Image: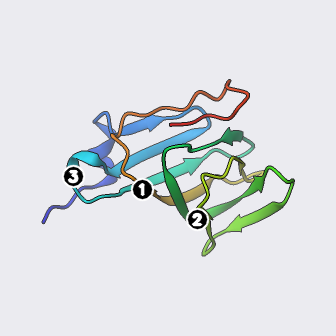
Amino acid sequence: MFVRSLLEVESTQRFVDWGNGTSHRLLTLQDNMGFTICHTVVRAGSESKLHYRNHLEACYCIEGEGEVEDMAGNVFPIRKGDIYVLDQHDPHYLRGGKTQDLVLVSVFNPPLTGSEKHDLTNPEGSAY
């Protein structure tokens, strides 16, 4: 068993500013759990086109608000208590709220190494 805190992660390479927010990679590949858990903050007013080609992801909102939009133009508001699931490697837009950050617990399978960063300039959507 082990315990790891957000504060502890902030002083390591497991803390990533990904451009439109931050990610505390609480569990990664090296922890041998078979999945990754991140505390993810999406900054208010931001928009990111993302496409996880190598990972499935589920995100549970624990604070704030935002939205996720699929490539068909369907927009899903996300608020505290909501989960969104990218079970088909779905390309999507992720947006922070108009005035509030969107705070998520993100789960990735297979696990991240922990140092991945987004390229938000990629027109295909940032991927890893």
In this picture the colour scheme is: rainbow
Side of 86 where 66 appears, left or right: right
Q: Counting residues from the N terminus, which is met first, the one under dot 1 or under dot 2?
A: 2
What amino acid does circle 1 point to? Asn
Side of 94 where 24 appears, left or right: left
Few, some or many residues within 10 Å of mark 2 (<14, 14–19, 20+): some
Where residue 59 appears, x then y in whole percent?
55, 62
Q: Check whether the beta carbons of the residues at disc 3 and disc 2 lie within 8 A of each other.
A: no
| Mark 2 lies on residue | 63
Where residue 120 appears, x then y in whole percent?
64, 29
Q: Counting residues from the N terminus, which is met first, the one under dot 3 or under dot 1?
A: 3
Q: Please identify the quarter of the rendering in which residue 13 is found.
A: top left
Element at label 2: strand
| Rendered view: 67 above or below 7 | below
| Mark 1 lies on residue | 109
What amino acid does circle 2 point to? Glu
